[in-house]
Structures are given as C-alpha cells and as structure tokens.
C-alpha cells in the first residue's frame, strides 16, 4: 500500500495535489515544444505567454529628442551621422585647416552643413504674437483676418480683409477699433526683436475711388502710415522702422485672383538680417 504524503502543517491537502498537477503540466508543455519543429516566431510567443503566466513583464523605456519643425528651443536640425567628404582623401597633400590632421593623415570624414542653414529665430516671436492676440477677447471675430507666416524676407504679419469682414472702413485710412487693438498688440512683441520693421499698405484690384485725387496709391500709403503710428504709440521705437510704403494693388496676396478682398491688407514685415559674420566661418 502506497504511503500517503503528509502536507506541512497549516496547508490544506488539496494544495499539494494542485502543485504536483501544475508541475506535470509545465513538463508536458516543455516536452511538446522540444519534440516539435522549432519556429522562432512561435517560440517567442510561447515564451512570452510563460513569462506572463509567472508574472514576468518586460518594461521598456525609450528616451530621446523628438525633432519638430518650428521648435523655438532648437536652433538647428540634429546632426545624425558623419558623411564622407570626397575632397579629403587618404593621400591628400593639400592643407585642410578645418580638420585637425594634415597631409597623408587628413581626415576623410567631416560633418556636413545641415539643410537648415539658418536658425529659426521667428518661431518664438510668432508664438508670442498669437498668444497676445488670444488674450484679447474682442478680436475673436477677426481671427481669420490675421496671418503670420515666415518667408525668405522674414516674419510677415498680415492684417487682411475677408469677404464681409473688413479691417478698415471702405475708402478710409483709419482702421476699426478692433483693427487698432490688433496692431497695438503687435508693438511690444516687435520691440523685443532686434530686426528692422517694414510696413506696407495694399489694396485690391477693381476698387473705385470717388475722389480722382485720392486713389489706390494714396490710400495704401496712408493706411501703412497709420499702422506705423499705432505701433509707435504702443511702444515701438522709431529707429526700428526700415520703411513705410504704399504698394496699391501691385503686389496682390493672391496673384491668381487680384480682385479678392484679402488682397486689401496691411503687412508688417520683420526683416530677416544676415549675420555680420558668415555662419560657416569659425574662429
């Protein structure tokens, strides 16, 4: 007669039987896997299932920098890898002042200049400007009339008309009060930048002017000058102004349709200035 195993004190008898059953099942599955044709993918699935059954969970943590366009905290795109420079060969005998080694030991690799050759200096200014407008609840209705875009010339701030919603009364050089608040909010932001400012007035094609002595050129010039005076009134120094011009309808915002209302606008350009020392020149 087989001798019955006695459970340790305090444990129920069924627990010992259950533990033996689990051990037999584990051995059974191990034998099945051993005698079968190994499939790497299936083996990883089974291994993962066993780990989860025993409470083993792999924790992964990834770290790094996420590059995104317009980030004011990063001036240049991250340099990722070295590129071969065909100008420097293993047997180069010309001077390579930009490298540490010369002659036969000249460096054969160097870091190429990034595609983004100049820093994105206007991203923070554009974000600050938009925030200043958001803090003015009265201009919510004209938010579609305000455009901020970075061009080759610099940061262009456009205050444009829309169909059924103009920023200036028809034929008047003085803006609506809402437009005045928009321009006033721009002045403190521009004052914090070192760049020169150009203010230009524009009209749409096809407009009629009752006074033959006061047409599109006079109106566009006067609107630009009034915008300039509002900027100065709210903190922009006079010496920061590069020019104030009236362009009439010569430079439409939408060249394919010069009759659109959005072509009638005031443009405030923060001019891009080249650095006094070329960026590729190192001391």
Image (cartoon, rainbow, N blue to C red):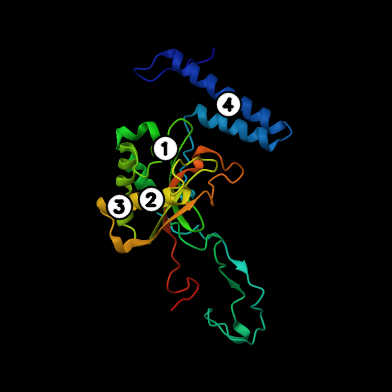
First in residue order: circle 4 vs circle 3: 4
Q: Name the residue at 33% across, 62% down.
A: 240
Label 3 crowd (10 A; few <14 / some 14-19 / many >=20): some
Quadrant in the picture for the N terminus:
top right
Q: Residue 111 placed where, x, y %? A: 55, 68
First in residue order: circle 2 vs circle 4: 4
Q: Which mark is residue 26?
A: 4
Asked if the residue at tag 3 contacts the one at tag 2, i.e. Cβ–Cβ closer than 8 Å, the answer is no
Q: Residue 188 placed where, x, y %? A: 28, 51
* Foreground disc of the pair 4, 3: 3
First in residue order: circle 2 vs circle 1: 1
Q: Secondary structure at mark 1?
A: loop
User: Which residue is identified by label 1?
Assistant: 170
Left or right of 14, for residue 102: right
User: Which residue is identified by label 2?
Assistant: 222
Q: Which mark is residue 229?
A: 3
First in residue order: circle 4 vs circle 1: 4
Q: Does the image show residue 124?
A: no
């Amino acid at each position: 007669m087989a001798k019955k195993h006695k459970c340790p004190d305090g444990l129920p008898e069924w627990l010992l039987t259950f533990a033996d059953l689990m051990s037999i099942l584990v051995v059974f599955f191990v034998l099945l896997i051993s005698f079968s044709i190994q499939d790497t993918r299936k083996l990883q699935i089974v291994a993962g299932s066993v780990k989860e059954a025993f409470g083993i969970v792999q924790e992964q943590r990834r770290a790094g920098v996420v590059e995104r366009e317009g980030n004011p905290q990063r001036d240049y795109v991250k340099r990722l890898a070295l590129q071969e420079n065909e100008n420097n060969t293993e047997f180069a005998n010309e001077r390579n002042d930009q490298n540490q080694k010369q002659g036969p030991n000249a460096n054969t690799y160097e870091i190429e200049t990034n595609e983004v050759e100049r820093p994105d200096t206007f991203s923070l200014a554009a974000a600050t400007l938009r925030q200043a407008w958001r803090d003015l609840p009265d201009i919510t209705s004209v938010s579609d009339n305000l455009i901020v875009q970075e061009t080759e010339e610099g940061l262009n701030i456009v205050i444009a008309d829309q169909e059924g919603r103009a920023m200036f009364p028809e034929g008047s050089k003085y803006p609506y009060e809402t437009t005045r608040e928009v321009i006033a909010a721009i002045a403190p932001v521009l004052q914090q930048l070192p760049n020169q400012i150009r203010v230009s007035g524009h009209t749409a094609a096809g407009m009629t002017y009752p006074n033959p002595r006061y047409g599109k050129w006079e109106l566009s010039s006067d609107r630009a000058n009034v915008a300039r005076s509002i900027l100065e009134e709210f903190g922009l120094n006079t010496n920061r102004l590069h020019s104030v011009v009236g362009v009439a309808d010569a430079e439409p915002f939408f060249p394919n349709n010069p009759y659109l209302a959005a072509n009638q606008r005031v443009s405030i350009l923060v001019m891009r200035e080249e650095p006094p020392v070329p960026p590729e020149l190192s001391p």
